[in-house]
């Protein structure tokens, strides 16, 4: 079992190197086997299909990002909700810049023909769970402000979505707070993706400062600023 675990890790490490060179759509079990000096049939005993290998890589990457976010939040003062939010955002950006190909696997273009199974959902929600914990803790402490003046009311058609998110990972938040968290989450990852994939080239000169400014603006929108 130890040998199997070691070879499984080696297969996944080689596959990650292939992602960096060819992208997720170009991942090939035969090419991975060739680089490992193995028969392709041997690799298929560990991962019966390319999609199963992709799923393993996706789960591992979500878990690595989630662990980084959880670790960072644990180091921040539990009562300083703004600092926890800033720490979370900076950690996500730092991880993405350090692991661009893994980030692209998670948040880049969908892989043609691949459909992620339910196994990927719990790892995928780990970062969002940290965000919701920060806001839920602020609610419990009576420290969460209302949304900015002029915020639109929650459309009735979105109430079911808010209820589902509240049940999954945002306990204690009302509909408006849930939707503010959702939009902040989308904006956070949108900013990281735009920077990482080069969409801010010639637009932004200081990415770190611009990102911090956006984080603070989002904190105010959520009610943490």
Image: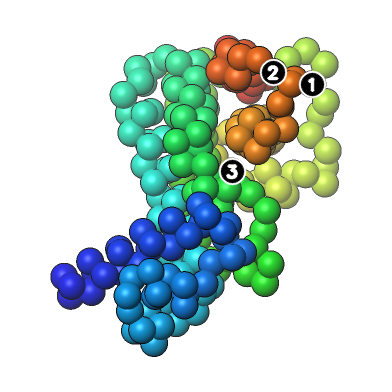
Q: Position of residue 19 (x, y in %)?
A: 51, 57
Q: Residue at x 42, y 70 (%)?
A: 32
Whether the residues at callouts 3 and 2 have beta carbons within 8 Å, the answer is no
Split into 4 quadrants, where in the image is the C terminus?
Answer: top right
Say whether disc 3 or disc 2 marks the residue closer to the N-terminus. Answer: 3
Look at discs 3 and 2 and give the one toward the viewer: 2
Say whether disc 1 or disc 2 marks the residue closer to the N-terminus. Answer: 1
Q: Secondary structure at mark 1?
A: loop
Split into 4 quadrants, where in the image is the N terminus?
Answer: bottom left
Q: Nearer the viewer, residue 152 or 113?
A: 113
State how far apart marks 3 and 2 are (Cα): 35 Å
Q: Which mark is residue 183?
A: none
Look at discs 1 and 2 and give the one toward the viewer: 2
Q: Residue at x 41, y 83 (%)?
A: 40
Q: Which mark is residue 166?
A: 3
Tally of numbered discs? 3
State the residue position of label 2. Answer: 204
Q: Quadrant of residue 158?
A: top right
Relative to 201, 168 lies left or right: left
Q: Residue at x 35, y 17 (%)?
A: 77
Q: Position of residue 109 (x, y in %)?
A: 68, 53
State how far apart marks 1 and 2 are (Cα): 28 Å
Is residue 3 depicted above or below 137 in this figure?
below
Q: Nearer the viewer, residue 154 or 23?
A: 23
State the residue position of label 1. Answer: 151
């Amino acid at each position: 079992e130890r040998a199997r675990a070691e070879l499984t890790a080696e297969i996944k490490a080689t596959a990650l190197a292939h992602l960096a060179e060819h992208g997720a759509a170009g991942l090939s079990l035969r090419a991975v086997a060739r680089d490992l000096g193995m028969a392709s049939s041997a690799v298929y005993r560990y991962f019966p299909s390319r999609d199963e290998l992709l799923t393993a890589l996706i789960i591992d990457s979500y878990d690595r990002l989630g662990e980084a976010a959880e670790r960072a939040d644990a180091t921040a003062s539990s009562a300083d909700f703004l600092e926890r939010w800033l720490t979370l955002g900076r950690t996500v950006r730092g991880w993405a810049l350090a692991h661009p190909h893994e980030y692209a696997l998670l948040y880049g273009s969908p892989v043609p023909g691949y459909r992620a199974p339910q196994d990927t959902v719990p790892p995928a929600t780990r970062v969002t769970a940290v965000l919701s914990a920060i806001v839920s803790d602020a609610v419990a402490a009576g420290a969460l402000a209302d949304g900015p003046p002029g915020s639109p009311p929650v459309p009735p058609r979105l109430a079911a979505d808010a209820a589902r998110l509240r049940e999954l990972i945002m306990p204690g938040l009302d509909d408006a707070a849930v939707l503010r968290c959702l939009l902040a989450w989308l904006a956070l990852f949108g900013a990281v993706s735009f920077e990482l994939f080069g969409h801010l080239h010639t637009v932004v000169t200081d990415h770190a400062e611009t990102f911090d400014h956006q984080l603070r603006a989002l904190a105010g929108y959520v009610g943490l600023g």
